[in-house]
Structure formats: structure tokens, C-alpha cells
Amino acid sequence: MIEQIMDRLTAVMFRVLGPAIRVSNRVLDRLPRPLDPFRSIKLKLAILLGLAGTTGITVFWFGIGWIAWKTAFAAAAVGLVTLQIFAHGMTKPLREMTAAARGMARGEYTRRVRATSRDEVGDLARAFNQMATDLGTADQQRRELIANVSHELRTPITALQGVLENLVDGVAEPDPEQLKTALAQTERLGRLVTELLDLSRLDAGVVALRVEELAAAKFLADSVAQARLAWPEITFELAPPDQSLRVQADPARLHQVFANLLDNAARHSPQDGTVTLTACQDGSTVQFEVIDAGPGIAPDLRERVFERFTRGDRSGTDGGTGLGLAIARWVVELHRGTISIADGGSGGSTGCRVRVILPILL
């Protein structure tokens, strides 16, 4: 019975005081937060209790001539008002984080929390804002990935479907040229799926390197020989490194890097162009360079080419998937190395020079 009466009294009090509290909160939001400079929430609580108690005692002291219950009520009211004014800035970020978290559950990542205090709540608010930014970026990347994958899959599927429809309808004969086109589109689909699986494994951190000692000269010669088979119209030149130059690496993954780099260089080189591969030791590292005589990459775009599905101006015309350099960067970083675009192409042209630096010992 007593619990029911208390519940009813509480409900009535909230109905009566609720609008006043909401109005006071809107007013307090416009006021400065005097406790923000303090770095400890414990200190803030101590200051709050001290201020509330001091104001209450002061009112009670000067109002001692009043009727006792009125004096006590006035002192308590003044203390609570003081507490509300000074505590508002402490609890507001928590309410904002609650509202922002509910927005995130609906897919809204644009809301931010005012983080002006220097205590633990302020640190939490700043961490929350950083988390919201990261989640928003991840969500945007997810949307872009879905859109890009859909586009990449649609292009070869549409071409393959067109070839097969022509063959079925009798519009075209199944001659070697038609079959070659169908095979090329099928290979493009297979390459895209393989590279997406590689990126998925790399993102999940489940790729284990099988490191062994490699002779740089033989490894590069094998890479160039395979590139020549794929691009017979391109001249591949290998500046033979020192025969004693060796590096510790995963041969399969490292071959993936140079196959992508040589393929990109050939793809963006002119007809009868030249692609050069060099390697030299620089202290405890080995510096590899793949150089072409193509149009090159503008300095402000050199970092972006290592992002997924970035293929430059020739996007959609050369059969690339836009994932090769992203995978190359992941593999190089797994080997504790770096990959970057340097200035200058072959023969003093404006081509592209991709530089890979790997430690000799892992």
C-alpha cells in the first residue's frame, strides 16, 4: 500500500516538475560550464556537495527567524537549485551520448557530443566522438564497397551475357575470337573474387606469412618472365641485382605484390612501352622499383591509388579490378615494409615509379 502511494506521488511530481525541468535544462544549456576546467570528477562532486551545502546552510542561517519548516525548505530548495546549475554541465555529455548512441542504432553517425570538460566524462565524450567518426567512416566504406563490387561484377557479367546470347541466338559463331572474349571476362570475374577473398583474409588478420630466405635475382627474374607471358607486346627490363642479395619473405605473397605491380605498369604503358624492374640493398633494407613510361600519377593522387577500387582515369576500360595495389600495400606492410609512388618514369618520362622497401631480416 505504501509503495503504491509513493509511486503515485512520484508520478505526480514528475508530471508537475517535468516541464519546469525541461525548460531549466534548455536555459542551462546556454550557460557556461564552470566546472569544466577541473580534471577529476571526484573533485567536481566534492565541489558540488560543498556548494550545495554551503548555500543551504547560508540560507538557513540568515533565515533562522522564519518558521522552522519554511527555513529548512528554503535552504533545501536553494541547495538543490545550486546543485542543478553546477551539475548540469557534468551530466549533459552523458545524456548527449545516450541520444547519440540511440541514433547510431538507427544508422545515424553524424551526431557529436560537446566535450569541453577535462575530467573522465570529457575523456569519455572525446572517445565517443572518435568512435562515432570511425563508425561513420566504416559505414561509408562498407556502402562504397558494396557499390563498387556490384559495379565490378556487373561489367564482366554483362559482357559475358552478351557473348553467350549472341552464340545461343545464332547471331555469332563460336569462333576463337568470341570464345577468347568470354574467357577474358570469366578470368576477370575470377580475379575479382580471388582479390576480394585476399582482402577479406587480410582484414581479418588470418594471413600467416610463410617466411623463407629468397635470392632476389632469381625471384625477380621469375616475376619478369611471367609478366612477359601475360604482356608480350610490352618490353620488360630487369636490372640484375647482386647475386648475393637475399631477403626473408613469403615467396607466394611477395610474388603477388610484384605480379600486381608489373601488371599495372604494363597496363598503363603505351604500346611497345618499356617496364623496368630494379633492386638494390640500402643498409638493412632492400629497395625495389617498378618503373613504366606511362602517363604517371599526379602527386596529390599518389596515396589514393593504394585505396580499394581506385584505378585512375582509365577505370572501366582496362579490365583491372582496382584492388591490386590495395593488396600489395597490405602484403608489404605484413613484411614490415613500405610501398609508395616516387617521382619519374623510365627514360626520363612522366611515368610511374613504384618503390617497395623491405627489411632484409624479418
Image (tube, helix red, strand yellow):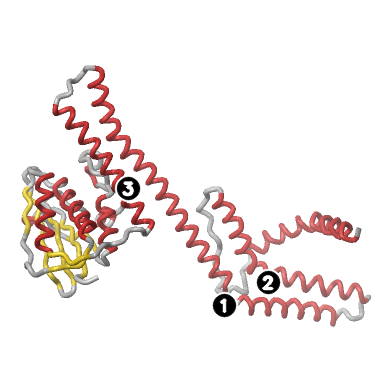
Residue 213 lies left or right of residue 106; in this view the side is left
Pointer 2 residue: 86
Residue density around tag 3, few if under 14, some if 14–19, many if 20 or more, within 10 Å: some
How far across and how far down the image is residue 161, in percent?
Answer: 28, 28
Separation (CA) of disc 3 from disc 1? 47 Å
How far across and how far down the image is residue 169, in percent?
Answer: 25, 17
Element under disc 3: helix
Separation (CA) of disc 2 from disc 1? 15 Å
The image's mark for residue 23 is: none
Pointer 1 residue: 39
Q: Residue drawn 33% across and 49% down? A: 197
The image's mark for residue 196 is: 3
Q: Residue drawn 31% across and 51% down? A: 198
Residue type at tag 3: Leu
Residue 160 lies left or right of residue 206; in this view the side is left
User: Looking at the image, is mark 2 or mark 1 earlier in the sequence?
Assistant: 1
Element under disc 1: loop
Pointer 2 with pointer 1, Cβ within 8 A: no
Pair 3/1: label in front = 3
Residue type at tag 2: Phe
Count of numbered circles on the image: 3
Pair 2/1: label in front = 1
